[in-house]
Amino acid sequence: MSTEQVTLQAKSPFELRVNLGKEVPEADVRSALASGDMGFLHSFTTGATVDGPGVRVVAWTAGCMWRCLYCHNPDTWTMSNGIPVTVAKAVEELRKYRQGLKAMAGGLTVSGGEPLMQHRFVEKLFAAARGMGIHTALDTNGYYGDRLSDAALDTVSLVLLDLKTSDPERHRALTGMDNAPTHAFARRLAARRLPIWVRYVLVPGLTDDPEDVAKTAAFAGALGNVERVDVLPFHQMGQFKWKKLGLEYKLEHTSPPSNELVEQACVLFRNAGLKAY
Ligand code: SF4
């Protein structure tokens, strides 16, 4: 096994990774982003069962323009923390798992970071995966959804869409960004009948206001293409990364939600006609 393979594979995305692409000249980064022939990956993990249907190979991309207060992978914010990987190399890795993924009704998930920071690389990877008959899932905050052409969306089997909070002000305070582009992307996916699995991180005191959750649920329910909602309890597994990166972590004293609070949120999504877990 080559050094590149050893470093690309990770047991989980919770491994802290920094500066792995810092030697790549800025001009090369720009041309990689423009062509999509090279991407910057935090890691590849295999065997996950929570990032789409069946057993998944997950490519974790580096680079995210949001700054969610509860982000558990802040080392994926910076693209230069990722390992530069050619699309040919990524496809070669994926090919090894092709038969197994099909046998286990799984597929490839591209997550992050925010994959659409490198949308051309993702497009090429998904086109190759679909060419091998592999199911593809895009895990995204949706902000750059308009970067994907309709043809590119045709290579996506499923979108795992992170909805954070409905209230625009609260959304800006939570992520640093507007939620309107995410909502526009969700509507576009709905018009194309492309299935969505919503992911909703439940953080006590930040995203658990029943009225706000109900609004998010109503929005998701009205789309008509949301197959399921996963209410993901906030956890502290990423806290050590904030500290090691010298970032100010504001949720040090926030506890994970109780089972009751998670169930209450699920009920609000179910009230909007959705399957929520
Ligand atoms: S969108 Fe995802 S990767 Fe980006 S800051 Fe938020 S939680 Fe982290």
Image: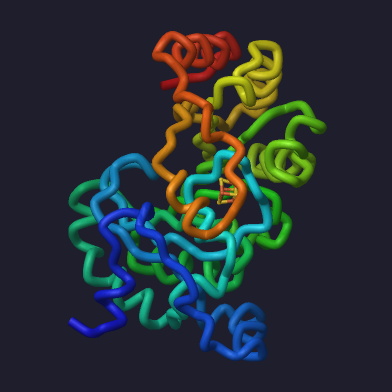
Rendering coords of residue 259 (x, y %)? 39, 14
Residue closer to the observer: 50 or 148: 50
Coordinates of residue 116 in the picture (x, y in percent)? 61, 61
Residue 267 to residue 94: above or below: above
In the displayed structure image, the side of residue 102 where residue 187 appears, left or right: right
Q: Nearer the viewer, residue 240 or 183?
A: 240
Count numbered badges in the picture.
0
What residue lies at 37% left-to-right and 57% top-to-bottom? 58
| Quarter of the figure with the C terminus | top left
82 above or below 109? below
Q: Point out residue 40 in the picture as x, y percentages from the top left corner.
A: 50, 73
Counting from the top left corner in percent of width and height, residue 243 is at 50, 52
Way the structure is coloured: rainbow
Q: Nearer the viewer, residue 253 or 75?
A: 253
Measuring 53% from the left and 26% from the top, which residue is drawn there?
A: 202
**Image point 18% across, 81% down: which residue?**
1
Q: Is residue 258 above or below residue 45?
A: above
Which sits in the foreground, 183 or 23?
A: 23
Whether residue 162 is visible to the viewer of this picture, yes or no, is yes
Q: Image point 68% across, 57% down: which residue?
A: 65
The answer to whether residue 19 is left or right of residue 141 is left
- Residue 120 is drawn in which quadrant? bottom right
Is residue 138 at least partly visible in the picture? Answer: no
Q: Is residue 20 above or below residue 258?
A: below
